[in-house]
Image: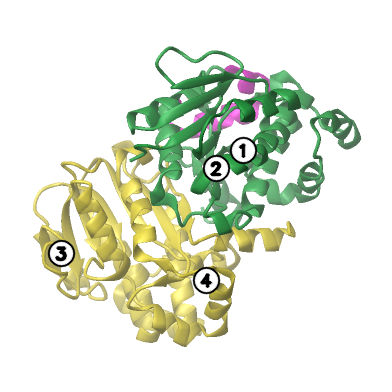
Chain colours: A green, B yellow
Amino acid sequence: MLQGKTIVITGAASGIGAACAAEAKSLGARVIAVDRNEPPAGLCDQFIRADLSRAESIDAVVGDIQGRVDALCNIAGLPPTRGDVLVLQVNFVGLRRLTLSLLPKLNEGASIVNLGSLAGFGWAGQVDQVRALLDVNSLDDVAAFCTQHGVDDARAYFLSKEALIAWTLQMRWQWRARGIRMNAVSPGPVETPIHQDFLQTLGERAEEDMRLLERAGQAEDIAPLVAFLCGEGSRWIRGVNIPCDGGMAAHILCQSAGLD
Amino acid sequence: MLQGKTIVITGAASGIGAACAAEAKSLGARVIAVDRNEPPAGLCDQFIRADLSRAESIDAVVGDIQGRVDALCNIAGLPPTRGDVLVLQVNFVGLRRLTLSLLPKLNEGASIVNLGSLAGFGWAGQVDQVRALLDVNSLDDVAAFCTQHGVDDARAYFLSKEALIAWTLQMRWQWRARGIRMNAVSPGPVETPIHQDFLQTLGERAEEDMRLLERAGQAEDIAPLVAFLCGEGSRWIRGVNIPCDGGMAAHILCQSAGLD
């Protein structure tokens, strides 16, 4: 289903990114992994080491990618424990820089898939702060933004995912003339190497999610949806944020609408 | 990907239902078509003629299905031109009756996919009327409901899709112990045999959608997402309504949040 396609996957060395790489490979894609750490042997066809919090590193990635790209999966992301500035840099501002820089190398009909989060679900209720972050164009300006807006580590994580989802919707028709679409996938709690970091920062809120679910999600639960969005079967889906969370988003929507 | 699976598809004789049947067949599924009209030769493995506005007809369908079922795709739907009562009966009350009656025949891990619509996007803003319709359990009570709530033909169509989406979210965990999930796919304007009926009833609103999109959707744009939701790759997606509309839902969300 992804035969002959070249797919760039950030965060491919572990967690959901690694599961996406394995899924894409199993469907026949050529996978270019972008990560701080080297992925397990055989998981990808090319590995580019990068630090998505640094502009020079991001620009070097774009230079290192040879040939055309059919899909970009922005999976790399940091948990709140890594600190407000790094979280906003890697999860949103750097991600957006990589995406915009890669656009000239994307083929007609290419797909961009962003890893959102249930944590970004409330973006519309925070739209003023989200808009302010959308206006931060340089990675160097993120620290000042955090100070100015009183953003702490936990808020930075939520805000990074809110902004990513809002940007995904905002760009619904941006590259339509080239047939390029962008969508987001929003997992709930997933057992990955950074899962404990979330529990540490989010505390009771994360534990409440786990009481409602019968199990935590696995990286392998998320990868098939990301792979589907990379392929041609998703050509008419644009600017959509798809929850993949065992029902948590539906639960929140029902509760807030008074359906239960 | 759907090899060895048995999939029941309502409305399979034409439009989006026929495209879903063709997609499921191409992925290896055994397709049982349920429709008022006979589908084209070769499109399905079994055909059951039914009128989803009549309880006896729905119950006969369930009796006619031999063996176990892995997925139910509720695609059949009437346009507003068919009249308020029939629209609510077929698009929601009858659909729900078929689904609940089929549940004992569904396998562990089965998937239910409902065809929503961009027209149902505003369900949360109409939640009182939606809740009232969710309480209508008999097809015979639909006519009285329409009178009591002053529902006309156009409103009936919107309400039928609002209720279908709300019910999909509400049932997020209803059959979780059996691993059965239900999700919805919501197309925007799609060129099908009933497309002209929509333009006739909805007038300017439908024309505005077409000005914003560069083309109408095709049934073949919708079918791959329905097929993906039928397969095991969607096991962690529950109670989700996925727009498949060329970006229309994103456009509405951005406008209402003041993002543009």
What's the distance in space between the residues labelled 2 and 4, CA to CA? 46 Å
Which dot marks residue A102?
1
Same subunit, labels 3 and 1: the answer reads no
Residue A110 to residue B147: above or below? above
| Relative depth, front residue between A1 and B178 | A1
The image quadrant that residue A139 belongs to is top right
Look at the image and tell me whether residue A110 can be seen: yes
Q: Amino acid at mark 4?
A: Gln
What's the distance in space between the residues labelled 1 and 4, CA to CA? 47 Å
Residue shown at 35%/73% (left/top)? B192
Circle 1 sits in a helix, a strand or a loop, which is it?
helix
* Image location of residue B242, percent across then percent down: 47, 53
Q: Amino acid at mark 2?
A: Leu
Q: Amino acid at mark 3?
A: Val
Segment colored magenta: A196-219
What's the distance in space between the residues labelled 2 and 3, CA to CA? 48 Å
What's the distance in space between the residues labelled 3 and 1, CA to CA? 52 Å
**In the rendered image, which residue does mark 2 sit on?**
A106
**In the rendered image, which residue does mark 4 sit on?**
B129
